Amino acid sequence: METLPTESGYFMYTKSHCKWCQKAKETLPNVVVVNVDHLLPDKNTEFLAFVDSFSGARPRTFPMVYYNGIYLGGCTESVEHLAIITHQ
């Protein structure tokens, strides 16, 4: 269906006109961004089932951010994660 999250670095599913998606794009270094506007709303159910199949969670808001292939959450969780790993 869509691109799977990368195994290294930050990856996010995003949609247009989302202030949280924009903030995450501006904050996360070298983030790989996949815009899913073309799947919403016609294929929303299929997209969510796809994401649920490998996320270990049921993300329902954007952005959907992953680090090294592991689901982090949205913008807030991702910014917190970045702060933690850059201060280690």
Image (cartoon, rainbow, N blue to C red):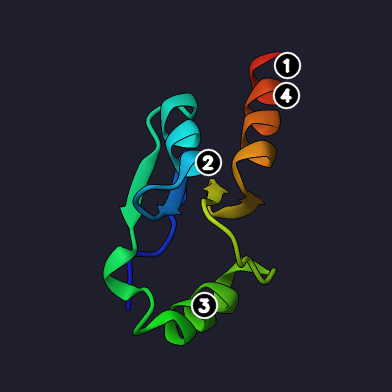
Q: How many marks are shown on the rendered structure? A: 4
Q: Are marks 1 and 4 in contact (CB under 8 Å)?
A: yes
Q: Are marks 1 and 2 in contact (CB under 8 Å)?
A: no
Q: Give the spatial CA distance, label 1 vs label 2.
A: 25 Å
Q: Earlier in the sequence, mark 2 or mark 4?
A: 2
Residue 38: x, y in percent?
26, 70
The answer to whether residue 17 is left or right of residue 82 is left
Q: Residue at x 63, y 65 (%)?
A: 59
> Closer to the observer: label 2 or label 4?
2
Q: Give above or below for 60 relative to 63.
A: below
Quickly name the residue at label 1. 88
Q: Residue at x 34, y 51 (%)?
A: 16
Quickly name the residue at label 2. 20
Residue 44 appears in the picture as rendered: yes
Q: Residue furthest top?
A: 87
Name the amino acid type tagged 3. Leu
83 and 76: which one is in front?
76
Tell me the number on the disc at residue 84: 4
Q: Earlier in the sequence, mark 4 or mark 3?
A: 3
Q: Give the spatial CA distance, label 1 vs label 4.
A: 7 Å
